[in-house]
Image (cartoon, coloured by chain):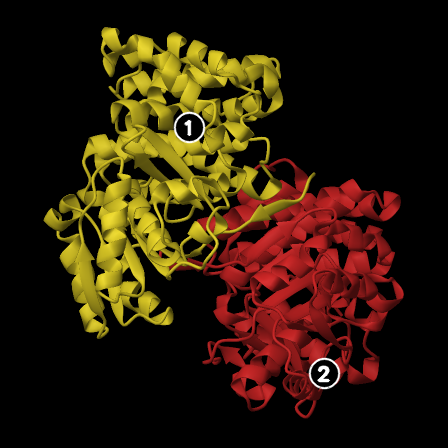
Chain colours: A red, B yellow
Amino acid sequence: MEITKFAIPEIIFGRGSINYAGQCALRHGAKKVFLVSDTGLEEAGWVQRVMDILESEGINWVYYMGVTPNPRDFQVEQGAEFYLKNGADVIMALGGGSVMDTAKGIAVIASNGGKVSDYEGANKIERPLPPMVFIPSTAGSGSDISQFCIISDTQRRVKMSIISRTLVPNISIVDPHILRTKSERLIIQSSIDALAHAIESYVSRIASPFTETQSLKAIDLIMRNLKPAIESRSLDSLEKLSIASTSASMAFSNASLGMEHAIAHSLGGMFDIEHGVIHPILLTSVMRMNLDSCIPRMAEIGKVILNRREKDDRSTALAGIEKLEEFFTSLGVAVKLRQLIDEESRGSLEQVCKVAVNDACNLTNPLDATWQDMLKACEEAW
Amino acid sequence: MEITKFAIPEIIFGRGSINYAGQCALRHGAKKVFLVSDTGLEEAGWVQRVMDILESEGINWVYYMGVTPNPRDFQVEQGAEFYLKNGADVIMALGGGSVMDTAKGIAVIASNGGKVSDYEGANKIERPLPPMVFIPSTAGSGSDISQFCIISDTQRRVKMSIISRTLVPNISIVDPHILRTKSERLIIQSSIDALAHAIESYVSRIASPFTETQSLKAIDLIMRNLKPAIESRSLDSLEKLSIASTSASMAFSNASLGMEHAIAHSLGGMFDIEHGVIHPILLTSVMRMNLDSCIPRMAEIGKVILNRREKDDRSTALAGIEKLEEFFTSLGVAVKLRQLIDEESRGSLEQVCKVAVNDACNLTNPLDATWQDMLKACEEAW
């Protein structure tokens, strides 16, 4: 095994853990918290809840809500200006991947200056960031755990992957209660995002013993708990999805991802499609394409999905992929690319793949994937 | 599930990872590293190796070697004086549990003042500690990962457990190469310490989904790799023991331990016995005593040890404990307390248990253990 690194934030997990938000901020010297969230969380009452918690600890706050799905570079740059103007310190994100990635981008620009695109790629951030305390509201993106930050470059219409250990938040507060106020659609999307994280990190070229167990555990928990969670909304099932997402995030943050996420970022940048919608469409096509590069690992994934082995590794892997396809179909989500993109835009897929091949996530894909391989996966998923 | 916390250091793991020691110190602002190690590591050439690595990065160092097995309070207090006098910054420990716990103790006293005994128990440390970069030389104590520090109080002849999140080092550099220069005796002792960490954390009252997988994985790796590692000294087997120890440490640091470690600390304090010698003697007696409080969990442990299930949970658990006893016997280590303690000192066991019952580790034991329960376990292990 080569040298491997494993870094995660301090995690505070469980029902009611949101109540620790103020104490966590204080531990990092908070006087004026920069709170980032969005209208959905305002409407569900969670933003007010966090404000109350901060106030009860005697902490001032300033609230920034300039967040949209697929956060844009200019939103981040405006947010950084707002942060500096207000003399805020600890950055607290309350939301899904878009909110948390916006908050991370603000942390980078506020402390390192320049534009978001200056930091695209791996390890480009030089100066330390403000303390970050994150409260994820979905069980999927893993931005609260990971060293990833994904921001759209509005001019180039691409999603930039910014990867740096310094982007790992100081503290992640994971409270499954928040999932209760989420729509079925969002729970499915974010859980499948976590599933894609788990699968891609498990077959990553830099997977390690510290990430592998987390990946497999996440796959198991999502396959067994996503449907019960949607049907019953029981806190037990939602909590298991939160555990799965946290585990998958520990894995992908340290083992990175693969070509499915590379294509998903590029597609999302080009067509402004929500990230979680793309995985049920692309994931199994990419798994088939990667299969020959990592048969034993795909078989382990298959074994977890199926809860049994077939006669050999290849059969187990394939049966797992088929079961996964059935699973996605049974969830009633789009499973073909043509359900998202017009026929007349189909020709843009070549450009999507030419961008995707340079996405940092593609570096760790088990197969040395060319843009032509990616296009083939997209066409199979069409 | 109640609210649970999970905190670990950044981990740099793998063959040759020691070469990152200088860069890691620099990342934490090192100008003059305070290096703590012992004569064994000097003789094996590792201390010089670290000094060379630091010098090649242009970092000054000062070397402290006042370390013995079962480190004493006064050694720590002297070390802190030496640290302050020399104007050192980053504390780097290179060694086993004794070296690392000495280094942690020095970090506490140098930054918080007072005596070691002022910090006995949980969460008594108030001011931040100097940055700590640790390089474990054994695969067992887990002090490089954990929030624990065990120091002997020489006046009271007890081992003090100091537990605080701030005792988690900033970076743990785990290089399996170092294990190659360790004696068979030390590899066995430290692996069985890791095994005890894994087992006690798995049945702990505050085990969480984030610690449970780590515990079971460690048990599996140690059962399958300890003998091959001793026989072949292959780097592959030694690496697996390092992975096991790191995993077990992630588990016990966050789920804590149980009455076996409580008794082991007390015995070690009273008789100055090396910590790793005690587990093969006490562990299975304590497991039998705890069994009825946690049958399903003991059955999971049994399943991992045996690689199969028996007809019911209780039988699986018991068969696992028996197999573990055979395993210890086959390693040729002491498995009875009378092999360590004279008959005339047997009467002191009551005092040992009366101290142990107040050890912080006993708080998370699945059975609400009294000193009489502990004495019974000791007598069974006599």
Q: Quadrant of the C terminus of chain B?
A: top left
Query: Which amino acid type is marked by label 2?
Result: Met
User: Residue A301 appears at what percent x and percent y?
Assistant: 59, 47
Q: In the drawing, what numbered circle is on residue A329? A: none
Q: Residue at x 61, y 71 (%)?
A: A90
Q: Quadrant of the N terminus of chain B?
A: top right
Element assignment for label 1: helix
Q: Nearer the viewer, mark 1 or mark 2?
A: 1
Give the farthest residue toward the left: B43
Q: Residue at x 52, y 16 (%)?
A: B370
Parent chain of label 2 = A
**Residue nearest the viewer, comparing A349 with A262:** A262
Is residue A272 shown above or below B162?
below
Parent chain of label 1 = B
Q: Which residue is mark 2?
A: A270
User: Residue B137 appears at what percent x and percent y?
Assistant: 26, 46
Is residue A190 shown above or below A338?
above
Disc 1 residue crowd, few under 14, some 14–19, many 20+, Cα 10 Å: many
Residue A140 in the figure: left or right of residue B21: right
Q: In the drawing, what numbered circle is on residue B261? A: 1
